[in-house]
Image (cartoon, rainbow, N blue to C red):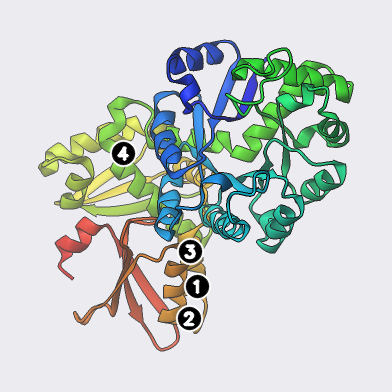
Amino acid sequence: MKIFETHAHYDDEAFKEDRDILLREMHSQGVEYIVNIGCSMESSQYIAELVERYDFLYGTVGVHPDDVERLTEADMEELAMLSRRDKIIAIGEIGLDYHYDGIDRDLQKHWFARQMEVARRQKLPIVVHSRDAAKDTLDLMKAEHARDIGGVIHCFSYGVEMAREYLDMGFYIGVGGVVTFKNGKKLKEVVEYAPLDRILLETDAPYLAPVPYRGKRNCSLYLEYVAEEIAALKGVAVEEVYEATFHNAASMYQITRVAERRSMICTSNSELPFNKLENNIIDAIEEQQLKLGYLKETVRLYYPLSSLNRFLDTQNSVEQMKSALQLFSAATRNRLGGVAVTNKGERFCIAIPPEGTEYIHKHMGTGGFLADLVATVAKEGSTLEDVLRQFYKYSKQVHVEEMKNGEFDYLVYFENGDPDSYYYCITVEESHIIYHRYTKADYEEFGF
């Protein structure tokens, strides 16, 4: 039995005294993965750090509708930056809550839409909170084309007709302790109606504990009661519920891809010195595949000794670097396939074999800013304005500087390094645009 807890709040004060003990106990008892959900800027910042302490804990970042009054555009940039961390796997919880009518509804709608846009930019699913706001939530999600984003309607509280709308949009239905309540009739009907492959298990811990623990502090160990009720309503074995909901959650959150990406970047502390170099190689191959398409063939990348020393935080001589790169090849063999290294003086060639380029193609993903930029530049007649539009689509903090060195026309980069930390040197031709990108350190060394 493997359980996937898709929605909990273990950053809550209710777990202050026993958080670590409880998390490890739950994992040892079959809770394979837990997703800790952000509700405010403060909780999102904390969660981004908390998830790094446990292999089985992942997180989301986002601001609950009850906490949007203090939000700013700078917060949207910070959410985008936090969401780029490997173990942040969704934007949420976000949405509309009219239950107490304390927060201006138009303000809630504004920040719900803005956070959906962050999710779209970062290519992450959304975790939607909707309480007593059925029509407005659905209308806004349709207006923002949330179908293209995907995600889950957390703690689903509406009827079958509304469930049908969300299911038709490709969303999952989050089911928790309420399904065990005597007054949970609507949710029971939704569970009976919804296909099992569109249902997720969640607790909303420490809230909404299922019967027989209703009114007490909730935790992921109590998901068995939720699963049993779903099994009874669907007329299937509880093991089938565990298996289906685990698969659903892993698919929505792309857990396998995230785990593979982390494996690619660093699988042990002994590989940490190679992290920057491996990232750069991956970035370069992703860029090439975006421009030329994927071919299972060897890719050769060239680096001066000074750049390699910066990536490895060393001051190696040529001979020392040759030895270091042999270690790099061994450390990354299970991902990059065993790179071959040659050199002519201080100029090194790192050859990534077909196995490595295939692995990157399968596991890294090629969407987002760079994909948009490459597509724009590839269009005949593209202009500088077209290129800058792609930068500003992803951030308001963009540096644009005219260059007068005779080689490039403009320098453009994201000031906060999000979603991309490279420096782009742009040349404007009569009918098209050419760009070269460099790390900041290489740009400064080359003295453009």
| Residue 275 in view here | yes
**Mark 4 or mark 1, which is nearer the start of the sequence?**
4
According to the image, label 1 marks what residue?
376
Closer-to-camera residue (308/67): 67
**Mark 1 or mark 3, which is nearer the start of the sequence?**
3
Whole-Å distance between the Cαs marked 2 and 1? Answer: 7 Å
Q: Tell me which corner region of the image, top left, top right, bottom left or bottom right, holds residue 425.
A: bottom left
Q: Amino acid at mark 1?
A: Thr
**Mark 3 or mark 4, which is nearer the start of the sequence?**
4
On screen, residue 313 versus residue 93, left or right, reads: left
Whole-Å distance between the Cαs marked 4 and 2? Answer: 35 Å
What label does residue 275 carry, if any? Answer: 4
User: For the residue labelled by badge 3, is the local secondary structure a helix, a strand or a loop?
Assistant: helix
What label does residue 291 carry, if any? Answer: 3
Q: Residues within 10 Å of mark 3 (few under 14, many from 20)?
A: some
Q: Position of residue 17 (x, y in %)?
A: 43, 15
Labels 3, 1: front one? 1
User: For the residue labelled by badge 1, is the local secondary structure a helix, a strand or a loop?
Assistant: helix
Closer-to-camera residue (242/322): 242
**Mark 2 or mark 3, which is nearer the start of the sequence?**
3
Q: Amino acid at mark 4?
A: Asn
Whole-Å distance between the Cαs marked 3 and 2? Answer: 16 Å
On screen, residue 99 versus residue 217, left or right, reads: right
Q: Residue at x 32, y 65 (%)?
A: 413
Answer yes or no: do the residues labelled 2 and 1 have beta carbons within 8 Å?
A: yes
What label does residue 166 carry, if any? Answer: none
Q: Residue at x 86, y 19 (%)?
A: 232
| Residue 64 in view here | no
